[in-house]
Amino acid sequence: MTELVLGGEFPTPTTEQWQGLVAKIVARSGVEGDAIEALTSHTADGIAIAPLYTASTDIPPTGLPGAFPFTRGRTTDGLRAGWDVRAHFADPDPTSLSEAALVDLDGGVTSLWLQVGPGATAVGELPAALRGVMLDLAGVCLDAGPEAVPAAEAYLALAAQSGVDAKTLTGCLGLDPWGTAARTGHHADIASDARAAGELARRVADEYPGLRALVVDALPYHDAGASNAQEIGLALAGGVAALRALTEAGLDVATALNSLEFRLSATADQFATVAKLRAARRAWAAVAAECGERGPAAGMRQHAVTSWPMVTRHDPWNNMLRTTLACFGACVGGADVITVRPFDAALGRPDALARRIARNTPALLLEESHIGAVLDPVGGSWLHEALSEQLAAAAWAVFTEIEAAGGLAAGLADGSVAARIATSRALRTAALADGTESIVGVTVFPLADEKLLDRPAAPEPPGGGLPRIRWEQEFESEVNQ
């Protein structure tokens, strides 16, 4: 029997032929100059996105999932068993927090991310806030800023009093002196807080093998308007600062690496999100290799959170589409933990519907779209492989510049980190203002005579350091005018 080849009766096209046809079409549109250059776009970090990628694209080997340099995933199993769906809570009322947490856990959430401190759950209210939560089944991640050590101690004491086996606790205690300084502007306490974090991390490593003591939170930089390369580069700088604190406390490199969790943003630009997570793992593996570790401990554990700057108050229903794209990018990019913000988060305290949709989004991608069924689904895609490698290189440049200038703590204290991000923020704001970029429902296609959804006020997160922006804010006054 003759084998049928799809399209076999047509001659094999060449790249040159494609370029010739594209040039004709571009010329007809009135665009002058090189056609390929005209169709090439650039990211905020100056990375060129070509209109076509082929097998001739120069891409370095990226290895296998679960193997150094971990570009293709942290583990050999990937996400086939699913990912940790983590819901965020910032509620000063421990009773309502407990009720909402139990609803979310019953609805498919697998871990809780608790804001602790002024305006949110008080340290002393943790037992009430976690009432009814089975701590040996549901992981807990604390986010307590300046009160991180007392909150961590209170949580560990609660687990002990509840009779929970220390070996069954999972999650992250959330110690992060550098992220706290970025949020609050309080830089004088970084050194002492880092020493305290290191001491607690040593105890956690010995007694609680399933817990990670420190988080390297890059959200303060993203929330201030940082580009993707800046976000990764600052995360690397924070990770190195944390490694120094942990090893100085007596932990070996592998144990120190296993004590860290990285928190990164996921945006509606799904390709950029995929590349960011892959590039962050690639770059962090290089840091670990410099420390002498190339094994599993060098794989970056990632908590991806849908972007705060991208959410809008106007036409908030579009936020469902934005967060779905962001969640998809986080899934494909290989995040271990995913938090989807409710679509009405920018309006105040989310309602029950918004929380339900937020927790169902990753569940639907896993159970109905089967996103986790394939290991690194973009592996071998010339676009994604090239973009991941280029973004890793750009992030490495940011990281090395920060290190050469004295490290992250110095950069936060002298304002150079803030200045670096401000430049990126201004460029994006200008692009939105001149129409190069747009926000659906705000800068384009605003709803006429829209009445904003009414939501109770939400607690304000700690401030005083880097700004926490939403891209919509600059243009809210223009909507419906």
Image (spheres, rainbow, N blue to C red):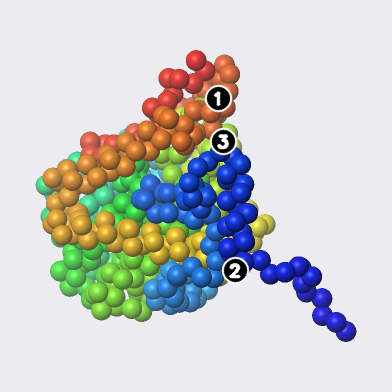
Tag 2: Cα neighbours inside 10 Å, few (<14), some, or many (≥20)? some
Q: Which amino acid does label 1 sit on?
A: Pro
Residue at the spot of label 2 = 374
Q: Which amino acid does label 3 sit on?
A: Asn
Expressed as whole percent of the image width and height from the top left, the position of residue 385 reads 47, 65
Residue at the spot of label 3 = 318
Label ID, residue 158:
none
| Secondary element at tag 1 | loop
Q: Report the mark closest to the observer, 1 or 3.
A: 1
Number of numbered discs overlaid on the protein picture: 3
| Secondary element at tag 2 | loop
Please name the residue shown 67% across and 57% down the image.
Answer: 368
Expressed as whole percent of the image width and height from the top left, the position of residue 78 reads 52, 70
Residue at the spot of label 1 = 446
The image quadrant where one finds the N terminus is bottom right
Q: Which amino acid does label 2 sit on?
A: Val
Mark yes or no: residue 314 visible.
Answer: yes
| Secondary element at tag 3 | helix
